[in-house]
Image (cartoon, helix red, strand yellow):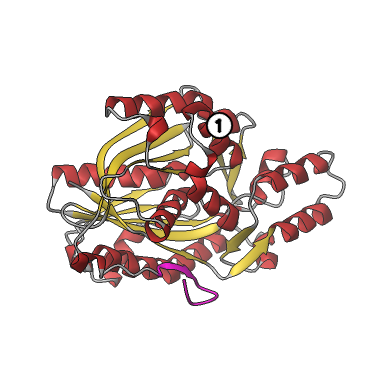
Amino acid sequence: MAVLCQPAVVVPEYVITLEETLTLTRRMHSRHPDLPLVLRLVENTGVRTRHLVRPIGETMRHDGFEQRNLVYEKQAKRLVPVVVERALANAGLRPDEVDMIVYVSCTGFMMPSMTAWLINSLGFGSSTRQLPIAQLGCAAGGAAINRAHDFCTAHPDRNVLIVACEFCSLCYQPEDLDVGSLLSDGLFGDAVAAAVVRGEGGCGMRLERNASHLIPDTERWISYAVKASGFHFRLDKRVPGTMEPLAPVLRDVVDEHRWDVSNLDFYIVHAGGPRILDDLCKYLDVAPECFRHSRATLTEYGNIASAVVLDAFYRLCSQEPPRHSARGVIAGFGPGITAEMALGAWRSDSARERHTVIPDSHLSVLEGRS
């Protein structure tokens, strides 16, 4: 049965703190009629630091869609190999043992996909399947896990590499001054993550069931307006309340598996903002501590889009690996409004395979260490 192994995560070297974000917001938007509201919303996100691929001064200058996309490609080729190498080591695999690469990103565009560059540059076989996913936003991390699970269910002896590359700072648009855009400016950060789903062997979450759900008629709640200047993020004020309809769906999926969603051993959930986690506590009847790994990602890195679930799962693997057969859920939420959900039980591996895991795979490019 397919196993999601310990991920690797890397964040770029430039850091902006909450205090710096608030100071910039006050200075740049001193006459904005909703400035007090914006400052309060940003402060209430719980985000304390975010990492950026460029210094804040460069980030805030709009040098054109073309130039930004060139930065995206350059930075992806710089950072993705780092996490790929370590994710493969964590899973005890070589590049030529990977049968499919799922690459998810909503913050830049390449064609051919980054998957082609990875195959040509890092030793993957030319028959490696490619599955780039570009338009599921924050839900794409969960979708990548689920598509890897599907592939390994159909091909039980095969392995899938997942890569999530999100440089949200490259989507900053200085002319977007609505409250949702200004909130997003203080919420999103940059990160790259990778993980392997092994068809056989490995230590981690044994994937047993996955499901998707779309809330009807919410397509415009999270979206991009694609203009000459690039991607303009649109966030509807109703988005924070989406857990009210999605929590019962998650409960039903768990019920179908004959588990109790209020009594699982671990929860890895997309941390789009604090209300999402608070509402899940309420509607699923679980303690706030259950979402500690997702909250830690939000606090230290901000919303890193599709990489959130992989980062939170990394924290679970590295800080407090569950006991064998512990039951858990992974859920990603994004445009649509879409939920991607996965259920599984923990698989402890042999001592020999555990020794292949690199425990310090949560990297900072700035510090050169975990």
Residue 283 lies in magenta, yes or no?
no
Name which residue lies at 70% across and 52% down: 174
Circle 1 SS class: helix
Q: Main secondary structure of the magenta part?
A: loop
Q: Tell which of 65 and 159 is nearer to you.
A: 159
Which residue is at 70% across, 57% downward?
18
User: How many badges with numbers are in the image?
Assistant: 1
Q: Nearer the viewer, residue 54 or 322?
A: 322
The amino acid marked with disc number 1 is Asp
The answer to whether any part of residue 106 appears in the image is no
Number of other residues with Cα within 10 Å of mark 1, as a class: few under 14, some 14 to 19, many 20 or more: some
Which residue is located at x 56 percent, y 71 percent? 13
In the displayed orientation, state which residue is furthest to the bottom: 368
At which x and y percent is residue 209? 26, 36
- Span shown in magenta: 360-370
Instruction: Determine whether, in the image, residue 175 is placed left or right of residue 125.
Output: right
Q: Is residue 354 left or right of residue 302?
A: left
Q: Is residue 178 visible?
A: yes
Check disc 1 and report the residue beneath it.
Answer: 279
Residue at the extreme front of the image, as rendered: 323
Q: Residue 363, how many percent across, how many down? A: 46, 69
- The image quadrant that residue 353 belongs to is bottom left
